[in-house]
Amino acid sequence: MASVSQEKPPFEKGGLGGFSFDQLHPALQHHIVNTLGWRSLRPLQEATIAPILRGEHAILLAPTAGGKTEAAVFPVLSRMLSERWEGLSVLYICPIKALLNNLEPRLAHYAGLVGRRVALWHGDVGPARKAKLIADPPDILLTTPESLEVTLISRRIDHRQLFANLRCVVLDEVHAFAGDDRGWHLLYLLERLSRIAGRDLQRVGLSATVGNPEHLCDWLAAGLDQPRRVIDPPTDAGRPPEIELDWVGNLRNAALVISRLHRGEKRLVFCDSRMQVEELAIELRGLGVSTYVSHSCLSLEERQAAETAFSQGQDCVIVATSTLELGIDVGDLDRIIQIDTPSRVSSFLQRIGRTGRRPGTARNCLFLITKAEAFLPAAALLQLWSEGFVEPIEPPPLPMHLFAQQIMGLALQETGITAADWPAWLGRLPGLGTLERDDFQRILDFMLETEILHTDQGLLGIGGSGERQFGARHFMDLFSVFVSPPSIKVFHGRQEIGEVHQSTFILKEEGPALLTLGGRSWATQYIDWPRRKAYVEPTALRGRSQWLSAGQPLHFELCQAIPRVLARAEPPVAFSRRALEHMAELREALDWVEPGKTFLIAEARDSLVWWTFAGRLVNATIANALAGEATRIVADNLTISFTGAVDLASMATAIRNKVFGKASELALPLDETFIAELKFGECLPAELREREMIARHDCSDALALLASVPMAVMRLSDSSLASGQISR
């Protein structure tokens, strides 16, 4: 082991004197001890060294600020030194640019200690800087999947030379990728990069707590020969977290509570919509609270200025969406405040992990519930957390539309490919291993028929229709796998503030459009529609911005927890007096609710409600199966309502036969809203597109669970069941 300066304290027991630490390159050992002054490694950092040095694929699990970055980077740097990797050998990939910007100084410091270099590569890095990086590549490149796609497609970059020496990829916040199509896109990019490098790349994923880490690890390393493992050693849980829920009724009251509580402390407030962020920021500033704003539709300069000012402040608040959930450093936090509720326990865990980092402090979160419809979901989420539940990560099945996107990307990357070429580039076909070769050929044939592709002497290239749909701005639409809403950039003079949906700028007869952005109100002076720019000036009038979003339906497990939290004698966490009173009112109104049952209730002569507690997608699937049993059927997260329905007994029979019958084949009705989720869906034949959408909205597991529980049938005025329980 490297010598230790005499001025340094002795190793802590179980610290840096361990066998795993001794396996690191001597130069790295020296700098960890003498330059960084570390006396010990965290359990995760110790446990990760040997597997990564052996070239294994791994998922590293730890809470926010749990030392995951160092756990991955130190052994990777050690391999770089011991095995004499040269050129660009490591990619460090993050889901958002802000996280890359935040990590770059720290990673550059670690690499610089042993004579290696780190650089950023994403959309905000200028052409001159990128040209220098291409001429003299760093050892570690920090980037996003979209920027990698740009690099592979670009005709100005020799990607074979740039990526020839790749050995390893570190995927930060890998759970944020795996749960949607960005994860599949990323895995396809790794297949293409492996072909260029001529070797499988070691894959190291960093993640907060997830419900199915082994499955996540298998997803990350699917089809690769090297061993893989989840590294999740026990850690000191520290002091019990301090969680409280308060019922405040509206956003103005929430601002009042925030302004009065925890004065002198730094508070990070999470909202789950950009509109809520903007409205709360204005309310707080009106109460004299030093307030900053961060969300994805603000310009880079606005976000960085807010986050820097907040990190250097003391008595202040930053109001943010989930953009600040992913570990971006905004300094030591005293408090986390949640407006209403996140949709997932995993998000809640990430958020409370931002606090409790200083010795003697505990993780904490105060829920301020502003809407009646958010109260029970918040309580249910805390019920799930108290039970130790964390959602599994489920990659969306059958990403056939991304196969089409990859074919177009390869056609640009290679200036044309043959039908025999693509299997070698796309390798293990992530997510599509169950398809037949004929299915892929049908997609290619359809893209040729619709002129999305064309063929010239056996070479596939982008056709006329593909050029029109995806070719604008050097094929920018091919780089991202999601549909971008039509937005307008907003400027105050030359300063870009951010962007909003174009519907914000519907000018009215009585004056200019008003909007809220960056926690300030603006009046529109001029709109340059061809360039999609709006110029604004500050105003004292209150504006309102539009960011169109479909919103997230509550998932099945969260809805199922609502009866359990209603049935508890004591709440799962500390409730304020107002919250206890509100919960008591809800329990009185829903005193018939019991865990482990559903309830079919007659509320009026022609109105029935089935309380399934199953989530909106499951309920919409059931409502589709029951079409025709009532004049009007409406599904939400907790119930299915029937207007103009038949009587209770007949509806119960219809549910038994049409929903839970052996021959029932239930499917979510897929309208244009769902189809629009598939950005490259127009590249697929209709039957394959429908097959993909049905697979992605399959509710069979939830329906099977509902089928196994009794359904109580009752009239609202009854104190007992009207018809007993229907067994299925």
Image (cartoon, grey):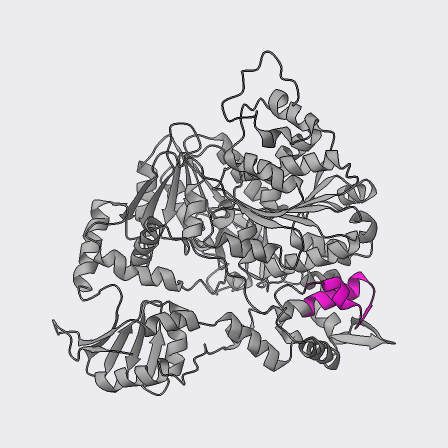
Q: Residue at x 77, y 74 (%)?
A: 463
Quadrant of res 38? top right
Q: Considering only vertical position in the picture, is 133 above or below 26?
A: below
Q: Give how far across and how far down residue 182 sits, in percent.
A: 60, 59
Quadrant of res 28? top right
Identify which residue, 207 or 96, lies in the foreground: 207
Asked if residue 419 is among those painted magenta in the image, a careful observer would answer: yes
Q: Give how far across and how far down residue 704 sits, in percent.
A: 38, 73
Q: Residue at x 54, y 20 (%)?
A: 11
Asked if residue 63 is among those painted magenta in the image, a careful observer would answer: no
Pick out the residue farthest to the right.
457
Pick out the residue farthest to the top.
6
Magenta stretch, residue numbers? 404-428
Q: Considering only vertical position in the picture, is 656 above or below 210?
A: below
Identify which residue, 317 or 573, lies in the foreground: 573
State left or right for residue 616 relative to residue 463: left
Q: Considering only vertical position in the picture, is 722 above or below 293?
A: below
State left or right for residue 495 relative to residue 192: left
**Which secondary structure type mostly characterizes the magenta part of the structure?**
helix
Q: Is residue 323 visible?
A: yes
Q: Quadrant of the C terminus?
A: bottom left
Q: Give how far across and how far down residue 193 sits, in percent.
A: 74, 54
Q: How many marks?
A: 0
Q: Residue at x 64, y 63 (%)?
A: 430
